[in-house]
Amino acid sequence: MRPPELTAPEQRVLGCLIEKRRTTPDTYPLSINALRLACNQSTNRDPVLDYDEHTVREAAQRLSHHGLARLASGAGSRAIKYRHLAEEGLGLGEQELAVLCVLLLRGPQTPGELKARTERLARIDSLAEVERLLETLMDRGYVSRLPRRPGLKEDRFIHLLRVEEEDAPARAAAASAVAAPIETERAAAQAVVAAPNPPERAPARVAARAAPNPPALASARVAARAAPNPPALAAAAPPPAPAVEDGLADRVARLEIEVSELHSELRALREALGE
């Protein structure tokens, strides 16, 4: 069977559907908003992305056309929800699907990394078992071995469920688009630290010391006493900001998802240690 060619948003959405079915079964199937938050997580993702709702919805619909997802909204549900059909669509078992999921969400991985990062999704007892699963996936045409980098002891593996022209350049562009605002803010902060007393502000400070109570300021103070509640001050009152509240709600939902995943990973690690 030839592997389906998925765009970058389709790969991320499929990986998230596979992952959340195992790590947060109580909230599965996923609504479009929950799926968007899962796609844009800052943990267990490489690269970190910032997809909007339209991009996620279109990717989920195209996965349905590939036979890898379907609508799963109940009769009384007002939200559109999706579940994956990767077992049937790709003909893979639980362990193979866990390995493929990590490759979809994190990019190229070594067998050791796959062993550690599939604990939340399926039980794989040894590194030899991971290598056997990779051989199976390579035989099926879903995974390929990358040339070993200088200085590394382990080979890395990459999934093949992708459009060929979307490889490294697209991944680098996506990562740069997300990192650009952060780098801009960091550069601005460094500029402020490097110049705590900018030259253009120094004359104003000297003038303020020379005239601690300038006439214009005194007039303003007199006017303020005469009008304790001036119209200009009332007009300056900030209006309600529902957009900020919506942003906080999204952040809370994203954090709840990440906390749930961390709890699942902690349980898996404790089981592996025999606690």
Image (cartoon, rainbow, N blue to C red):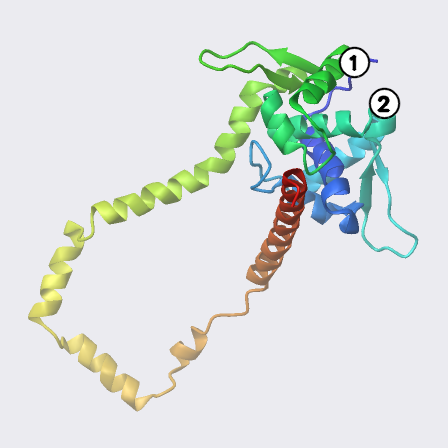
Instruction: Give the SS element for disc 2.
Output: loop
Establish if 99 lies above or below 183: above
Q: Amino acid under label 1? A: Arg
130 and 142: which is toward the camera: 130
Q: Is residue 28 above or below residue 11?
A: below
User: Is 173 in front, or is 211?
Assistant: 173
Report x, y in % for residue 207: 10, 65
Task: Tell me, for residue 161, which label it has, or none.
Answer: none
Identify the image quadrant of residue 268: top right
Q: Is residue 100 left or right of residue 192?
A: right
Residue behind mark 2: 91
**How far across and how far down the image is residue 264, in percent?**
67, 46
Location of the N terminus (image quadrant): top right
The amino acid type, in three-letter code, at marker 2 is: Gly
Classify 125 as above or below 274. Answer: above
Q: Is residue 173 visible?
A: yes
Relative to 10, is 246 on the left or the right?
left
